[in-house]
Image (cartoon, rainbow, N blue to C red):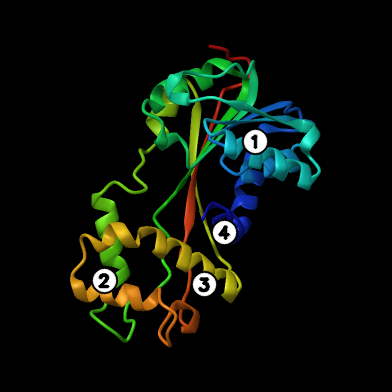
Amino acid sequence: MLEIDAQVMAPVLADLVEQVAEQAGAGTTRVVDLGAGTGVGTVALARRLPDAEVVAVDRAPAMLARVLTAARVAGVGDRVRTLEADLGQGWPDTGEVDLVWASSSLHEVPDPAAVLRRAADVLAPGGSVAVVEMDTLPRFLPDDLGRGRPGLEVRCHDVLARAGWNSYQDWTPYLAAVGLEVSRHRHVLETQPQADLLVRYARAFLQRIRDYVGQHLPAEDLAVLDVLLGSGPESLESRGDLALQASRTLWLATRPPGVRR
């Protein structure tokens, strides 16, 4: 799911990294990627900031192994290192940092305010913290599927919202509280992925949520969802009306030059 999402959202990631890199500046020498996952952000930052060492932090050794593989394949392995750490247990030993990047990870830690305080503590004067979150869960389906009651996807998202899926704070006051100057930006996916990639993404997401929403949807809705996830003539692969709606929000927070905590 993470790897497909990275392929689909590549244009948005490129916009985000470009904006963050412009703010960070050419003198950036150390970047920390919090909750690095499969290393998509790590690699993108290493490519865009050729003088920087990028430290990928994650609590899962399997993810960190993926990061190193992705970095080697991308030709930036010599500037990427990993740190196995659980941010719920404290800040890892990163030394002073020019840029902290946290994409879809900050809301996963038990005390994000504490993480941001420590990020600010290690941030060099003029350094930045970039926090990225998924605005809403991705949308794929037309409102009227030609089967069942219109609005199936909206009802699925309502179920997930009530359960706290993709729940996160407005990070502006958190970042301002640690002395950083904050701006907020929204980046929308403006180009549709190729049809086969779009179908793979829709299937991966709907399959992932099926078991949970299935416990809360009416039987009619669940039956329609299972038809979409099946292999028959009304499956996702057989439809020609899928369209992706997706976006990301970036909080870009900077310590003014000459100001140190």
Q: CA distance from mark 2 to mark 4?
A: 25 Å
In the rendered structure, are the residues bearing label 3 and label 1 in contact, judged by CB atoms less than 8 Å apart?
Answer: no
Q: Which residue is mark 4?
A: 4
Sequence-wise, the earlier of marks 2 and 4 is 4
Q: Label 1's element?
A: helix
Q: Which residue is mark 3?
A: 199
The answer for how far apart the CA atoms under marks 1 and 2 are is 47 Å
Please tell me whether mark 3 or mark 1 is closer to you in this view.
Answer: 3
Label 4: state its secondary structure: helix
Rendered position, 52 above or below 257: below
User: Could you say which quadrant of the image residue 66 lies in?
Assistant: top right
Badge 1: residue crowd in 10 Å (few <14, some 14–19, many ≥20):
some
Q: Earlier in the sequence, mark 1 or mark 2?
A: 1
How far apart in space, not on screen, are marks 4 and 1 (Cα)? Answer: 28 Å
- Residue identified by numbered label 1: 23
2 or 4: mark nearer the eye: 2
- Callout 3 crowding tier (Cα within 10 Å): few <14, some 14–19, many ≥20: many
The first of marks 4 and 1 along the sequence is 4
- What residue sits 44% from the left and 19% below the top? 89
Percent x, y of residue 223: 27, 76
Q: Say which label, 3 or 1, has the lower sequence index.
A: 1
> SS for tag 2?
helix
C-beta proximity under 8 Å, tags 1 and 2 = no
Examine the rendering and report whether any part of residue 110 can be seen: yes
Indicate which disc residue 222 carries.
Answer: 2
- Establish if 226 lies above or below 156: below
